Image (cartoon, rainbow, N blue to C red):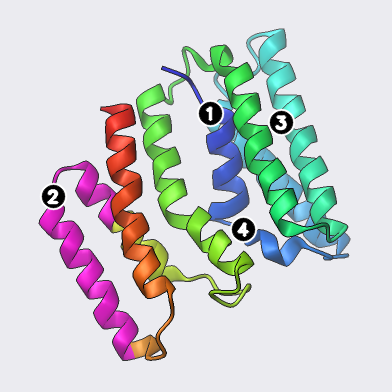
Amino acid sequence: MLNLHLFLAHTVSDYSFTNPVKMYANKSLTFKLKHFVWIALVFLAFSFDSVFLSAAGIAAFMISLGFHSFVDYLRYKNMNKWMVEGISIGGFLILAFIFSGVFANSFVSPFFSLYLIGMVLVSVIPTQIFRMLNLIDPIENESDGISERIAMYIFIFGGAFWYAVLAAAFALVYRLIFRKKFNLTWIISPIIGIIIPIIFSFIIL
């Protein structure tokens, strides 16, 4: 099984705890430095036991930080968002394949790594796409949708399908009470929450 640790580290650092939309045309040096430090720490968290054991590991770490800095540079230059985020996701997927062997003995197992990647893909990546499509406010965190999809992912992955339905129902009630104004994400979000865990259950299990 492939060890996609670099792709996991990138998606977690860049999408789970950061809103990349805020980075476009942002001129603040302090913001850029804080973001880079955060990225380096997250990459270390997923790779510290592997990347400094070999020349290939050191190369994987340095190339990853360099490529991420390049992606951020494109964002700061306010380049086309779809192009930049496509380069970001595609580039790190390629790097993860290339350096998969570096993480063969990592404490983060391939199973756990893929499980977390699935969780990222079902939660924060759709929110980023919703922002870019203006389905939600670009500054919006969309916490209700993220929570709904994560819950559905965990339940479906564990075979508790009725709990997944219940999570979707609770999310709908929450939106009806607090959001009130209908949005397409009300429909799209639970569909994603169903499809992604089913796909990953076939990949991992």
- Percent across and percent down for residue 18 are 62, 58
Q: CA distance from mark 4 to mark 2?
A: 31 Å
Q: Earlier in the sequence, mark 4 or mark 2?
A: 4
> At 21% across and 50% down in the image, what residue appears?
155
Q: Based on the displayed image, in which of its 4 quarters is residue 56 positioned?
A: top right
What residue is disc 3 on? 64
Residue bearing the label numbered 1: 5
Give, as a three-letter code, the residue at label 4: Thr
Of pointers 4 and 1, the one earlier in the residue sequence: 1
Q: Residues within 10 Å of mark 2 (few under 14, many from 20)?
A: few
Q: Quadrant of the C terminus?
A: top left
The residue that mark 4 highlights is 18
Residues at marks 3 and 2, CA–CA distance in whole angstroms:
37 Å
Of 10 and 39, the residue lying toward us: 10
Task: Kindly report which numbered mark, 3 or 2, lies closer to the viewer in this rendering.
Answer: 2
**Structural distance between the alpha carbons of marks 3 and 1:** 11 Å
Instruction: Name the front one of labels 4 and 2.
Output: 2
Question: First in sequence: mark 4 or mark 3?
Answer: 4
Q: Residue 35, percent across and down?
A: 73, 52
Q: Which element is circle 4 on?
A: loop
| Label 2 sits on residue | 160
